[in-house]
Image (cartoon, grey):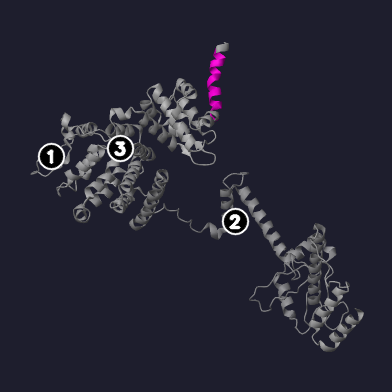
Amino acid sequence: MDEYFNQMNKIIKEKMTSSRIRFMLQDVLDLRKNIWVPRRGDQGPKTIDQIHKEAELEEHQEQIKVHQQLLSKKESPGSHTPGGGPNSQPQDDGCGNTVPISKDRPIDTNRLYKIIKSGGMDLNNLVLAPGGKAGCKGVWRSWEKGCSGGTEAKPASSERPATSTLNHFSALQQTSSLLSSSDTDHRDRDHFDRSGHVDGREGSPITKRSFSRESQERGGRSEESAPTPPPSLPKPSLSEEEMEKKSKAIIDEYLHITDLKEALQCVAELNSASMLYVFVRQGLESTLERSTTVREHLGLLLHQLVKVGTLPTEQYYKGLQEILEVTEDMAIDIPYMWLYLAELITPMLHEGGIPMGQLFREISKPLVPLGKAGVLLAQILQLLCKGMTPKKVGDLWIEAGLNWNDFLPEDKDVNKFVTEQKVEFTTGEELGPKEVVKKQLLSGEELSKQLDRLLQDKADNKHIMDWVEANLDEEQAASNHFVRSLMASVCGIAIICEHPYKAIAEQIMVRAELLQKYLNDEEKELQALYALQAMMVHMEEPANLLCMFFDTLYDEDIIKEEAFYKWETSKDPAEQTGRGVVLKSVTAFFTWLREPEEESDKE
């Protein structure tokens, strides 16, 4: 083995001319002999103490480097050296100021004579030398004046350029100037305090406003004489083009997410009440040829804007009339235009909107000359009948004092028009047995869909009751199927789909009147509880959600105590799916419900 290594070493020395290859092969041989030592030691993670020591060492090295640079500049040609020499200059022992004096520069003695003769010397500010004997005051004045000696600095336009020499105290020049200006500011502030110019009172606390005014007063007499800036002008109203862009963005967002509250806030933040007719016009134009649902949603938004007072009725009329004035041309391209306009306008007749008489008279003004006012009004009345009974719609027509003769051309037969448009209820005549509209029987899915739509659109309780009366007969309205659908829709809207699920009690409280109307006996209340049970099973029994519903329904007197006990002990085989888990989730509610009875029994 030794002979092998010797031969390898000989080959390396003779054949390998590259030092890199030679060293690599040498490392291989050392590894085989177990004598290889790494060039760099094994560096593990550093400790906190090592990091601090390295930081101190780097800082010390930086200080030495700066000190060496200062010394090298000080020892450069033309400066004073400790050993003396032809270029040596006097050095001040007091504060380290070194004033270079060139021997080649002649001294004009006439200038000294002029200074003495004119009395221009300021003995109070003259500092002959900042030596140690001058005391702290002398040193301070030397630092305040800088390294120029003791005299004032000459301006840049002087005949003799100013000279400066770097020394150990150069870094203090800026600090000195700052201290000097601060001292001046303190003297100025004391002056203003004594004169009563700061905030108009002596000893008054310095607030942001008073400090700002004080800073302006310290600016000097020139700033005092400057004219005050004009007051900020109110924000200019949006131009029509800007209003169209913002309106389009708000309407598109609302129709996409159908967040009515957010849309109302966005319109209010436009802060341009005089330009809201542009919003109305933009909304009508952008939705006229879209789906029925989109048009109804926009009509609901306009109704809510009028209801809360954000949209003045004059602005609504102005924006609507701009569309109505061109309906004759639009009807060529949009065959069902009058129905589409009616879907946009009808929500305005809901509670809190515009009364029927006022609305019909205003929107008919541009249409009467065209002979189309009656067509639009008839479409609106027919849509109203989907939300309330024809008799109620007829009563609203009569109470508003409306007459078809005011809206139809003179040569138009009113009776024929009323019959053709199926609005006989506006004449005040009672419908005969053959004329009673047969109400369509809605399926469970369709019924739930309609109720959800009304609740999501935040229709008031009266509107929902009118819809039930107009679309459901008495048998349907009294059925268990309707009660279950109503309870599921009301409670479904109140659920916040977060983790964990939560119920908004206020959503149920505002529907208390609606629920009490249709849950009018114990059997209806029991069916409502069965509907909630089925909802919880479908949602996989979320914790505490049913208990929240029970608390609110009991507190608002929507469901009586007896109905709760009957539901708890029910053995109906059709209602046993998931019942065990649901019952366990409301144990706390029934424990609380029995506590008053136990206390009364003890008394």
Main SS of the magenta part reads helix
Residue 14 at what x, y percent from top left? Answer: 85, 89
* Residue 287 part of the magenta segment: no
Mark 1 belongs to which amino acid?
A: Asn
Residue at x 36%, y 43% (from the top left corner): 310
3D distance between C-alphas at marks 2 and 1: 80 Å
Q: Nearer the viewer, residue 572 or 178?
A: 572
Q: Earlier in the sequence, mark 3 or mark 1?
A: 3
Image-based side of 92 in relation to 124, left or right: right
Q: Quadrant of the C terminus?
A: top right
Q: Earlier in the sequence, mark 2 or mark 3?
A: 2
3D distance between C-alphas at marks 3 and 1: 25 Å
Would you name the residue on which mark 1 appears? 405
The disc at residue 350 is 3
Residue 284 at what x, y percent from top left? Answer: 29, 50
Please report the bounds of the magenta region as a residue range: 585-600
Residue 480 at what x, y percent from top left? Answer: 37, 28
Mark 2 belongs to which amino acid?
A: Arg
Q: Earlier in the sequence, mark 2 or mark 1?
A: 2
3D distance between C-alphas at marks 2 and 3: 65 Å
Q: Is any atom of residue 281 visible in this view?
A: yes
Please say if 52 is above or below 448: below
Residue 464 at what x, y percent from top left? Answer: 33, 34
Would you name the residue on which mark 2 appears? 218
Q: Which residue is outermost to the bottom?
A: 14
Residue at x 61%, y 49% (from the top left corner): 195
Residue at x 54%, y 17% (from the top left corner): 596
Mark 3 belongs to which amino acid?
A: His
2 or 3: mark nearer the eye: 3
Q: Which residue is outermost to the right?
A: 2
Q: Is any atom of residue 123 visible in this view?
A: no
Where disc 3 sits, the SS reads: loop
